[in-house]
Amino acid sequence: MKRRKVDVRAVPAKAANAVDDRFQVSTPLRRLLNKVFPDHWSFLLGEIALFSFIVLLLTGVFLTFFFEPALTEVIYNGSYAPLRGTHMTAAYASTLEISFDVRGGLIMRQMHHWAALLFMASIVVHMLRVFFTGAFRKPREVNWVIGSLLFWVGFLAGFTGYSLPDDGLSGTGLRIASAIMLSIPVVGSWVTSSIFGGEFPGDIIISRMFIAHVLLVPGLLVALISAHLGLVFKQKHTQWPGPGRTNDNVVGERMFPRYALKQGGFFMLVFGVIALMGGLMQINPVWLFGPYEAWVVSAASQPDWYVMFLDGSTRLMPAWEIVIPIGDGYVIPPLFWPTVVLPGILVGLSLAYPWLEARQTKDYRSHNLLQRPRDTPVRTALGAMAVTFFMVLTLTGANDVIAEKFFISLNAMTWAGRIGILLAPPLAYYLTYRICLGLQQHDREVLAHGVETGIIRRLPDGRFEEVHQPLSSGHGELEYTGWVVPKKMNRLGALGPAIKGFFYPIEKPVEAPVSPGHPPVEERPERSEISSDNR
């Protein structure tokens, strides 16, 4: 079958794209390389999570060669003089050896820890972007579920990771985990003894956590990330509304070569920032905590930031025990509610939210265009409410440190957290809802009356008014399309280009929807191949 050849070198960019979409041979590799990605800074948050995970894998492989996951008691005789002659576990001794005796070991440890914190932070911020812009709506509900599971699996990876060194801080965290398991009704004792191999701390927990941390949990993370990326490539990419953007196309840059090269440079930037933090910013100095002793617990023992909300919920929970009259009385301890029930509710709500909103709004259509948060005030207010709830619990997880540094009563801090957890989230909901309505009203005023020019005109009757630049040549109010409403003259082209300074522009230039100097590429729905024989 003879195919018609089309030369698109001399065709304008937009026309060339249209010809290419229609006449090129659509192979899987070409479809992959021609995948179009919108050019917007908010889409980079997911890439930060992916790149920090790659750094986690690279540094973790290095640390695996030198870490000894054993609770065998040894006498330390390494380079760190203050702990020489101290009895400790082999796990803690090998951690000290990595920090002081292995070339590059300390920077690898710190890069690994900083990458883990950045991985969790980027997942949270990325999911907030997805939530507030409505990117979880049909047909992307499954990808939202995968993203939610990524946070909790990353949570488990972080916990198993910082529990491995068996220092004073990580041992305290393991003791708290044991208490949480024991608080589970009916099966708590069996679960604890099965995981720890008997009474806490046992002698096999570190080796089991090592296997989970370097094999099982990373494997699950790789599977979830692969499924997440596969769905992103399979489905049409979301994009912001704007000129030329519809629910059936994607405007941006092709994956190869420009987008791939930009992402390669962005990976090196993320890697460099993590390496800089690992070399200059100390984190988790286990040599200062000493080996773990079950009877020694210091003040100001806080976990990583993404676990502190559970610590805060435990501190706010009153000491209420529920006694069930079975036999001699079955007691449900107060620790069970903030550490088992609360995470279960949070997981359930986060996984089910796309379907809950679709049922509430009766909207079951497919959506590829994002929404501005101001256009969905209820959802935005719910998100602000959830963030406030999380922040109150996180701050309460450090209430002992805050009380000490600011000379406040610890009991007062606890009661402030209890009152704040009841009042702050509803207040955040109300304020956010009203702000969204105010921003909507402002957009409608600009569409109806035009952009403020700063020019004051005096009327014949002596009154003064500001001259507005209408957004259209006709009469009447423009329809709001979900895109940014211009509110400055330079966005209308009424002002000249930005004035350049020596190091940076004096006036910031207007940002284009896509990279300046490069025409956008429009990804259209795939069409069947057309040849000269079946025209």
Image (cartoon, rainbow, N blue to C red):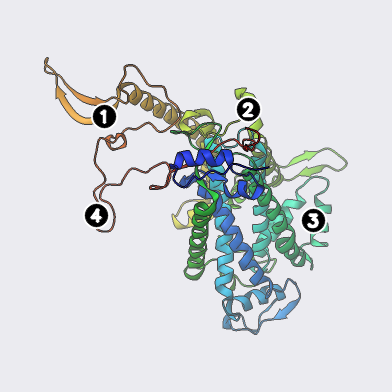
SS class, disc 2: helix
Q: Residue 452 carries which label?
A: 1
Q: Judge left or right: residue 517 versus residue 213.
A: left
Q: Is mark 4 on a helix, strand or loop?
A: loop
Question: Is the residue marked by circle 3 packed among few (<14), some (14-19), or many (20+) residues within 10 Å?
Answer: many
Query: Can you give x and y, in whole percent of width and height, for residue 418 in the image?
Result: 56, 41
Determine the CA span between mark 3 and mark 4.
65 Å
93, above or below 425, in the image: below
Q: Is mark 1 on a helix, strand or loop?
A: strand
Identity, as a three-letter code, of the amino acid under mark 3 = Thr
> Vertically, is 305 above or below 79?
above
Please report the residue visible at 47 percent of the width from the left and 33 percent of the height from the top.
241
Q: At 28% across and 58% down in the image, what residue appears?
A: 503
The numbered mark, 1 or 2, whose residue comes first in the sequence reads 2
Residue type beneath disc 1: Glu
Examine the rendered structure and indicate whether residue 244 appears above or below residue 166: above
Callouts 1 and 3 close, C-beta under 8 Å: no
Residue 358: mark in rendering: 2
Q: In terms of sequence position, does the residue under pointer 2 or pointer 3 come before the other?
A: 3
